[in-house]
Amino acid sequence: MKRFLIAMSMISAAAVPAFSATVTNSGSAPVVLVVVEGGNRMEVALDAGQTETICPAGCFLTLPNGDRVGLEGGETVDVKDGSATVR
């Protein structure tokens, strides 16, 4: 039974990134995004061209231009010049 629980935990952990959102900074300057997930607030800094995986359980993303976007997970977000395109 213990092996089964360990195996299920590993499978669950491996499945989480599939539902995460991917954020890419397509601009030429670094950006800082504010991510609020499950009541926890954190800042994510992205250099130009950098991609980061965030929000495995959904979140709210505040962009440099002040816009706030709700993400469920699985989205691809492209940030350029402070605004975003969500696919």
Image (cartoon, rainbow, N blue to C red):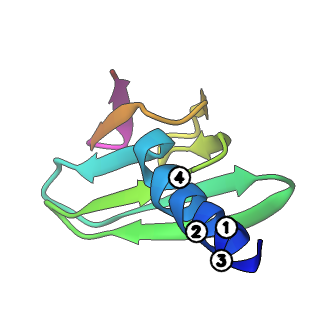
Name the residue type under label 2: Ala
Which residue lies under the disc numbered 1? 4
Q: CA distance from mark 3 to mark 4?
A: 20 Å
Tag 2, which secondary structure? helix
Q: Label for residue 20?
A: none
Mark 3 — residue? 3
Q: Which residue is mark 4?
A: 16
Q: Are marks 2 and 1 in contact (CB under 8 Å)?
A: yes
Q: Nearer the viewer, residue 23 or 17?
A: 17
Residue tagged 2:
7
Percent position of residue 59, x then y: 67, 43
How many numbered circles are shown?
4
Magenta range: 80-86
Q: CA distance from mark 3 to mark 1?
A: 4 Å
Residue located at (72% from left, 53% from top): 36
Give the mark nearest the N terminus, 1 or 4: 1
Image depth: mark 2 or mark 3 in front: 3
Is 70 placed left or right of 46 in the picture?
Answer: right
Query: Mark 2, mark 4: which one is toward the viewer?
Result: 2
Task: For the residues labelled 1 and 4, say whether their Cβ atoms are less than 8 Å apart.
Answer: no
